[in-house]
Amino acid sequence: MNKNFGIFGGQYVPEALVKPLEELGEAFESYCYSEEFKKESNKYMKDYVGRPSLLYYAERLTKQLGGAKIYLKREDLNHTGAHKINNVIGQILLAKHMGKKRVIAETGAGQHGVATATGAALFGMECTIFMGQEDMRRQELNVFRMKMLGAEVKGVASGTATLKDAVDEAFNEYVKRVDDTFYVVGSVVGPYPYPLMVREFQKIIGEEAKTQMMEAEGRLPDCLIGCVGGGSNAIGLFYDFLEHDNVKIIGVEAAGRGIKTGLHASAFAEGKVGVIHGMKTYMMTDDEGNIKPAYSISAGLDYPGVGPEHAYLKDVGRVEYVSVTDDEAMEGFRLLSQTEGIIPAIESSHALGYAALVVPKMKKEDIVLINLSGRGDKDANTAYKYFMDKNDCNSL
């Protein structure tokens, strides 16, 4: 298979990882398209994860915004509370097939870490999760959940102590113990075959949504919206709709405290192409080409790069990429909570925050489908602090 998405992607890794990644790619291509894998994966998706996830018409949110009809793809209802489990089940089944006894993962918001720890417990594998110490502080509940599931959580103090640094440490560990360890990458990032592999395990989101939308409305939506950090939940929704040119597709990055402040996590706003974590893609760099720290109120979007397939889709013009600030995202957080009784993850709130800006300008007969990639119980402390700092008692 092609290792690139146009000029993006590839495999920029140390010599020690070339052969292991080739073996991983071969195992993925031979096993994960087989009927044996599909049968086993489908069983766990249905009986363990709880798929298909629901398509939900958000009637009160639609009335509140006064424009297009809004549907939510409820990935927050999956076991472990996010889309991450789709990818983890696929990768751990592959790890078992390859004879690996130990899995490692990086995590930012903690959802991928929880999903990996869950999969490791399910299949009886040793598990180590790398997590930036700043993210551990922001996501205490998920740290506890990972430990409760039997995983070792290793805090990373280097750099900004967030997601990028956790990825660095996970790759370092993978190099050291590649013989017995499988690295469960959490997003559509990294060297080939990871971006392709994770997309294949996440595309079930869009496949289901297409069928469900036809059943609910008799037609496809006019617009898809998904939040983008690395971008696995977004590509999972987008992929099956890419061939339909009449469906507008929008990815929403984190603008943090504003693009002009430099305190953001929008790789596309920077407009620079480079190599990060084994892939060529858009990323945040300074004038000397050094990776710049990313910032977002959302631990899961706090990443200075983006998946290479998203980079390709931006360059060919098929997907529009925008960004919203912390404040706009938290307004989306409050809006869904108080109109529909659904508390979203702050990552997903970026998609909701953008929808709140554009849906009122759309026609009432239009349909917007938003990927609700995760639930917000993990973000309770962050949201509480945010609203209290703003002395916004009406939000609580």
Image (spheres, rainbow, N blue to C red):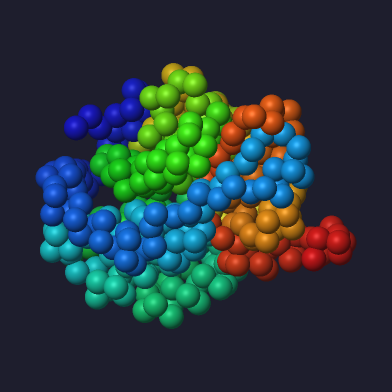
Which residue does the image show at 67% across and 48% down from the upper left? 59
183 shown above or below 289: below
- Location of the C terminus (image quadrant): bottom right
Which residue does the image show at 45% across and 66% down from the upper left? 80
Q: Is residue 12 left or right of residue 280?
A: left
Residue 61 is at least partly visible in this image: yes
- Location of the N terminus (image quadrant): top left
The quarter of the picture where residue 173 lies is bottom left
Residue 113 is at least partly visible in this image: no
**Residue 128 coordinates in the image, percent (x, y):** 35, 69
167 shown above or below 157: above
Q: Nearer the viewer, residue 370 or 278?
A: 370
Q: Nearer the viewer, residue 133 or 114?
A: 114
**Residue 44 coordinates in the image, percent (x, y):** 28, 63
Which residue does the image show at 32% across and 66% down from the upper left? 47
The quarter of the picture where residue 37 lies is bottom left
Q: Is residue 382 left or right of residue 232?
A: right
Count of all numbered marks drawn on residues in the image: 0
Which residue does the image show at 25% across and 71% down from the upper left? 123
Q: Nearer the viewer, residue 243 or 296?
A: 243
**Residue 310 coordinates in the image, percent (x, y):** 44, 32
Q: Nearer the viewer, residue 300 or 370?
A: 370
